[in-house]
Amino acid sequence: MPVSRPDLMRWQFDFTWSLAEVHLRKLRPEDFLWEPAAHCWTLRQGAGGAWVPDFAEVEPDPVPVPTIAWLSWHLGWWWSVTLDHASGRPPRERDDVRWPGAEHAVDWLRGLRTGWIGVLDGLSEPDLDAVATFPWPDNTELTVAHQLGWVNAELMKNVAEIGQLRMLRAAG
């Protein structure tokens, strides 16, 4: 039986999210700020109490090992901005996307999932062929279908990294 492209994209996302839940449901607040190496990126509380991510516009060499906190912030950052674009809202700047802290990070990510499902469920076949300007600002060829594939790939990559760190911490 043929499957429409929107249905296939939704299936792929649901499958990716089911893998995410394997790790997200096992995370504990103390896992988030565990530093797996001396050279790492994490989040630190600023003067006003807001969490501030380590970040550089140009990725350093060697690349710092991220903490689960940093990875969950990074995931929330790109997904929030992607949702802004997909929903026709003005996209937030990186500094405007705030990590809610270890106690609320998983709920934050689950809320982004709910928002993304709304985007996916609102798509029709022709929507997938529209040009997507995020995350490619100068793009004239990559489509919304490409963007959806990118979200699934980024989600799977970030969740695999979170899972690996969670398992290393549990094993240590």
Image (cartoon, grey):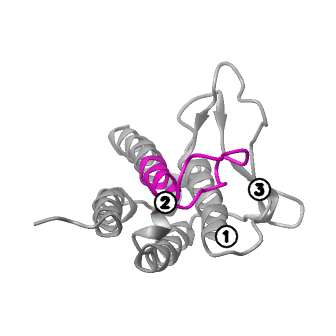
From the top left corner, tell me how far across and down residue 118 is, in percent. Answer: 47, 80
Q: Which of marks 3 and 2 is in front?
A: 2
Give the structural element (helix, strand or loop) at label 2: helix
Residue 96 falls in image quadrant = bottom right
**Residue 167 can be seen, yes or no:** yes
Q: Name the residue under label 2.
A: 129
Question: Amino acid under label 2?
Answer: Asp
**Residue 9 lies within the magenta run:** no
The image shows residue 89, relative to residue 153, as above or below, that is below
Give the structural element (helix, strand or loop) at label 3: helix
- Who's the residue at 31% across and 59% down the image? 12
- 69 left or right, relative to 89: left
Per the rendering, the mark at residue 84 is 1
- The tag earlier along the polypeptide, 1 or 3, is 1
Tell me which segment is drawn in magenta: 129-154
Question: CA gap, disc 1 to disc 3?
Answer: 12 Å
Work out whether residue 130 or residue 76 is closer to the camera in this orientation and state it: 130
Question: Amino acid under label 3?
Answer: Arg
Question: CA gap, disc 2 to disc 1?
Answer: 19 Å
Quadrant of image for the N terminus: bottom left
Q: Residues within 10 Å of mark 3 (few under 14, many from 20)?
A: few
Q: Name the residue under label 3.
A: 94
